[in-house]
Image (cartoon, rainbow, N blue to C red):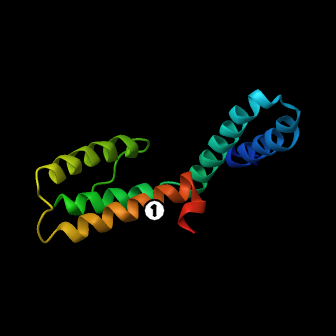
Amino acid sequence: MNDRPDARNLLQTARGALVADLLPALPEALRYTALMIANAMAIAQREIEAGDARLRDEHDRVCSLLGERPRTPAAGALHGVLEDYNRRLARAIRAGRFDGKERAAMLDHLQRTTTEKLGVSNPKLVK
């Protein structure tokens, strides 16, 4: 069974039509809104293309920083589990847990996570 076009292809086609066909015909007052929509579609497409690998890597790094063994979240639960871990990491940072020798590992994690997120939301910034 051929499931083409997939979500990535649909987003690409819809964004292309928005930018090439609709945007030039829109009044000036609506162009900024249309560009924001096109940008959101491009971000969603990059997220689909990236899959869960970036999130799983972040999950593993946070678990390591917190001294916990990584566990594999159930399908669809990764975002929520990672959100909980990030809240715990933030509390640990505020409590001074990473003021000593673990500081370098925490800073490396934060830099890698930020770079990975920018690679999806605004890839021009990380080139």
Q: Amino acid at mark 1?
A: Thr
Q: Residue at x 83, y 41 (%)?
A: 17
Q: Position of residue 3 (x, y in %)?
A: 73, 46
Crowd class of label 1 (few under 14; some 14 to 19; many from 20; radius 10 Å): some
Q: Quadrant of residue 38?
A: top right
Q: Is residue 16 visible?
A: yes
Q: Residue at x 66, y 42 (%)?
A: 41
* Nearer the observer, 41 or 56: 41
The residue positioned farthest toward the front in the image shown: 28
Q: Quadrant of residue 15?
A: top right
Q: Position of residue 75 (x, y in %)?
A: 42, 44
Q: Quadrant of residue 34?
A: top right
Q: Position of residue 82 (x, y in %)?
A: 33, 47
Residue beneath disc 1: 115
Judge left or right: residue 99 versus residue 33: left
Q: Is residue 53 visible?
A: no
Judge left or right: residue 36 versus residue 12: left
* Nearer the observer, 89 or 78: 89
